[in-house]
Every structure is written in C-alpha cells, then in structure tokens.
C-alpha cells in the first residue's frame, strides 16, 4: 500500500471503547482543517466506531490499515463549513429500565459490541450484531419490535440506534451506560 502521510498522530493503543473516540474528539481540535489525523489503536471495535464518528461529525474517514495488532485509522478534519454537528440519540433507557423490560415481557436486546466482547459476557438472549456489521445485517431485526441497543458504555449503541432509526426502525432505545455497569443476568458463549 502507498505510504499514507498524517499531519498528527494520536496514540490510543491499549485503550478500550469509548476511550479511542474520547481521545480522538479532543485531538481533532488540535488539527488544522483539511489535515489528516492518524489514530493508532488496538481495540477492534475502534474500526466501526471511528468511521461512524467521523461520518456523523462531518469529518472524512479515509480508512484503516492493520499492521500486526495495531489499527491505523486515518481521519481528515473537515474544513470550514464541512463539519456537521454530532448527534446524540434521544430515546435512551438506563440499565434498570432494561432489567424491568426484560422481566415484563418480550423485548429484543441488540448487542453491538465486537464478537469477543459478546462471547465473554452478554445479556441472555441478546442478538449479537457488531456495530461494523449492522448496516448490512439490519434486515435480521424486525422493524416492529422494541429494540434495546447495548454496548459497553452507550457510545457505539448510540450510533447504532441512530443507524436503525435511519433505516426505519422507530421503537429503538439506547441503553446507557450499558455492559460496563450491567448488574443483571449475564451468560457467556
């Protein structure tokens, strides 16, 4: 592959979601419009997270190069007039609300974490569709179902809920803070 030049480098290696996004949000302020920020990360979830964040905030996601265990993400900062405002999904529930829903009936829990995260512990009967695959796999969900989207902290699930809304799902809820503070039942696969 052609050598890709970056104007700024952010080291996010060893950090788990949501920290690569949190650090990128701060670092992008130090980058001149039109310049490229290289984010080096080891969290596999950062592939989908950084792409979605860049698109939603108006910056240009250029791509990711994998070098061993390191993911090198390239994002071009939007020039004046290019950037859009980040949005936050408005239909949210907390972990306790989800536990009550699970006790009361038939709900769909969508876990958008990476497969490895899901395998080591997830809400029983949750459907696993990693965020990076959701665009292509949304048809596996029923549009009329109440869907509670969960990730580790509520960040990826926020972006996933927005994506589902764009695809015509209306009964979608982002679960915050998600699995990082989940004290309900968990199963492993």
Image (cartoon, rainbow, N blue to C red):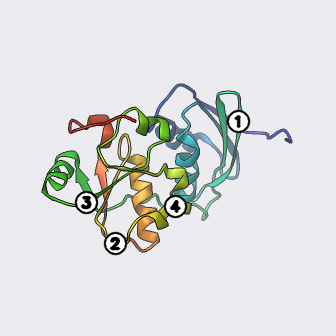
Q: Please report the residue visible at 38 percent of the width from the left and 69 percent of the height from the top.
A: 142
Label 1 to label 2: alpha-carbon separation: 36 Å
Looking at the image, which residue sits at the far top? 14
Residue that mark 2 sits on: 170
Quadrant housing the C terminus: top left
SS label for mark 4: helix
Label 1 to label 4: alpha-carbon separation: 24 Å
Residue nearest the observer in this picture, 162 or 26: 162
Q: How many marks?
A: 4
| Mark 2 vs mark 4: in front | 4
Mark 2 and mark 3 in contact? Answer it, CB < 8 Å.
no
Neighbor class of circle 4 (other Cα within 10 Å; few <14, some 14-19, many 20+) is few
SS label for mark 3: loop
Neighbor class of circle 2 (other Cα within 10 Å; few <14, some 14-19, many 20+) is some
Residue that mark 3 sits on: 107
Label 4 to label 3: alpha-carbon separation: 19 Å
Q: Taking 112 as reference, is 109 left or right?
A: left
Label annotation for residue 150: none
Image location of residue 48, percent across then percent down: 55, 48
Image location of residue 140, percent across then percent down: 46, 63
Neighbor class of circle 3 (other Cα within 10 Å; few <14, some 14-19, many 20+) is some
Residue that mark 4 sits on: 137
Along the polypeptide, which appears first: circle 4 or circle 3?
Answer: 3
Residue nearest the observer in this picture, 157 or 13: 157
| Mark 1 vs mark 4: in front | 4
Along the polypeptide, which appears first: circle 1 or circle 3?
Answer: 1
Label annotation for residue 66: 1
Residue nearest the observer in this picture, 125 or 98: 125
Label 2 to label 4: alpha-carbon separation: 17 Å
Residue 157 lies, with reference to residue 172, above or below; the image says: above
């Amino acid at each position: 592959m052609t050598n890709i030049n970056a104007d700024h480098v952010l080291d996010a290696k060893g950090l788990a979601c949501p920290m690569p996004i949190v650090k990128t949000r701060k670092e992008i302020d130090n980058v001149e419009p039109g310049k490229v920020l290289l984010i080096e990360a080891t969290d596999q979830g950062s592939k989908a997270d950084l792409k979605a964040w860049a698109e939603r905030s108006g910056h240009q996601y250029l791509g990711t190069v994998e070098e061993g265990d390191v993911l090198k993400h390239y994002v071009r900062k939007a020039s004046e007039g290019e950037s859009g405002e980040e949005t936050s999904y408005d239909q949210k529930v907390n972990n306790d609300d989800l536990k009550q829903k699970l006790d009361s009936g038939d709900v769909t829990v969508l876990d958008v974490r990476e497969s490895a995260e899901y395998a080591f512990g997830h809400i029983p009967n949750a459907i696993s569709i990693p965020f990076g695959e959701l665009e292509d796999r949304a048809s596996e969900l029923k549009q009329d179902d109440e869907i509670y989207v969960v990730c580790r902290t509520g960040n990826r699930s926020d972006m996933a809920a927005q994506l589902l809304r764009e695809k015509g799902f209306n009964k979608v809820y982002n679960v915050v803070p998600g699995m990082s503070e989940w004290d309900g039942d968990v199963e492993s696969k």
